[in-house]
């Protein structure tokens, strides 16, 4: 036992030329524990299977809760579909037709009108490239109509659109058929130009006006401008046309046509349009959709199904991992 004042250990403290490593080795040889070695160690001792089970369970629970929330939100949305293209009066190109639809319950506004296209491919390389961006966007300089082929001139585009004629959007100028179309390209050629009348309630006679503003992307509203009204055949500041100029990624899609700001009462409504969009050359189908929206957007059954199925599979996977984990620990 060391006497008080015994400084023998101090002789082993490294001096100017002693190595620090030698001092550490000396301390270890005397069984003097480093402070960190005396602390209690806390470490996860579960297996990777148990970790995976917990992870899958939490993820699956989140997906199930999200799926239930989406289902509740979906039930708050009223969606009405009218396949008006199949109606006898609306199937002939260039004819005006009127049809009715029924609103079963109160539809809270705003109520959006969409056209739904089926078997209509905008997701092709040709569709993406065959247009002139400088004609559409005022913030893009330069002129390049080479990508508009084969819809380059007014004749190429307006020759098959007798309901428009060779008139500029200001109504004052006759367009030269051989001049470059403004805008040109396949996007401009097949732009959806059917316009619908205001919606009228059959019983009360109340009319609901369609609004065409506040439905397009703000970037397009700010930059799609009528740069040459006397040479243009299409009003690029009309927001439904702006929406159509953005290609869709799937062969079945919806494009917004307008919206009704007020609520729609239950009952039967009349609406009219002129069939100016000939789908026979595309072998496609079109329908009119009326729908309101909420915080999750419009009605989307796929969003509900994908979350519920994904959550169920994840929880089943967590149960399987738990069984595998505890099976290894059962006595044989």
Image (tube, grey):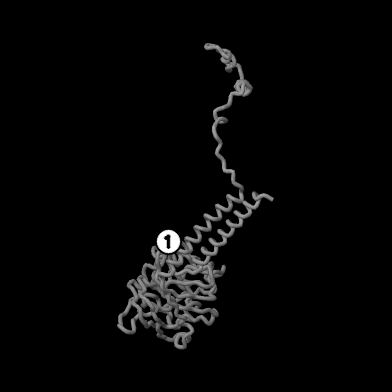
Above or below: residue 182 compared with residue 218: below
Residue at numbered disc 1: 139
Query: Is there any visible trace of residue 146 in the rendered image?
Result: no
> Looking at the picture, does residue 27 appear above or below residue 101?
above
In the drawing, does residue 124 fall left or right of residue 66?
right
The residue at the point 61 percent across, 17 percent down is 18
Q: Report the label total.
A: 1
Residue 147: give x, y in percent of width and height: 53, 68
Residue 35 in the image, given as x and y percentages of width and height: 54, 28
Q: Residue at x 52, y 74 (%)?
A: 151
What is the x, y in percent for residue 8?
Answer: 58, 13
Residue at left offset 55%, top offset 12%:
3
From this viewpoint, is residue 181 visible?
yes
Single out the residue that lies furthest toward the front: 331
Extreme-bottom residue of the structure: 88
Callout 1: helix, strand or loop? loop
Q: Position of residue 116 (x, y in %)?
A: 47, 75
- The single residue placed furthest to the right in the displayed view is 332
User: How many residues crowd mark 1 within 10 Å: few (<14), some (14–19), many (20+)?
Assistant: few
Q: Nearer the viewer, residue 46 or 135?
A: 46
| Front residue of 325 and 9 | 325
Observer-nearest residue: 168 or 243?
A: 243
The residue under the point 45% across, 61% down is 141
> 120 or 11, which is in the foreground?
11
Q: Quadrant of the N terminus?
A: top right
């Amino acid at each position: 036992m060391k006497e008080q004042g015994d400084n023998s250990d101090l002789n082993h403290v490294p001096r100017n030329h002693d190595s620090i490593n030698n001092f550490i080795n000396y301390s270890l040889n005397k069984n003097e524990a480093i402070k960190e070695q005396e602390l209690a160690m806390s470490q996860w001792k579960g297996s990777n299977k148990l970790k995976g089970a917990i992870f899958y369970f939490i993820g699956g629970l989140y997906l199930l809760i999200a799926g239930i929330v989406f289902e509740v939100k979906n039930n708050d949305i009223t969606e009405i579909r009218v396949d008006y293209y199949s109606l006898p009066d609306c199937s002939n190109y260039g004819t005006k037709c009127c049809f009715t639809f029924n609103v079963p319950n109160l539809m809270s506004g705003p109520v959006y009108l969409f056209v739904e296209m089926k078997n209509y491919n905008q997701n092709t390389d040709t569709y993406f490239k065959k247009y002139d961006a400088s004609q559409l966007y005022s913030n893009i300089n330069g002129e390049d109509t080479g990508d508009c082929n084969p819809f380059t001139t007014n004749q190429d585009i307006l020759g098959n659109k007798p309901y428009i004629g060779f008139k500029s959007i200001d109504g004052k100028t006759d367009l030269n058929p051989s001049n470059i179309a403004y805008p040109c390209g396949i996007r401009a050629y097949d732009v959806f130009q059917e316009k619908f009348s205001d919606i009228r309630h059959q019983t009360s006679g109340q009319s609901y006006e369609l609004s065409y503003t506040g439905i397009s992307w703000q970037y397009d509203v700010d930059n799609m401008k009528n740069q040459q009204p006397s040479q243009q055949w299409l009003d690029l500041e009309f927001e439904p046309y702006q929406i159509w100029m953005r290609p869709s990624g799937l062969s079945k899609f919806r494009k917004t046509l307008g919206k009704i700001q007020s609520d729609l009462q239950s009952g039967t409504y009349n609406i009219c349009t002129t069939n100016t969009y000939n789908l026979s050359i595309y072998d496609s189908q079109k329908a009119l959709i009326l729908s309101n929206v909420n915080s999750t957007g419009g009605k989307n059954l796929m969003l509900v199904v994908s979350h519920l199925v994904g959550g169920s599979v994840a929880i089943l996977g967590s149960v399987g991992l738990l069984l595998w984990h505890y099976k290894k620990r059962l006595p044989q």
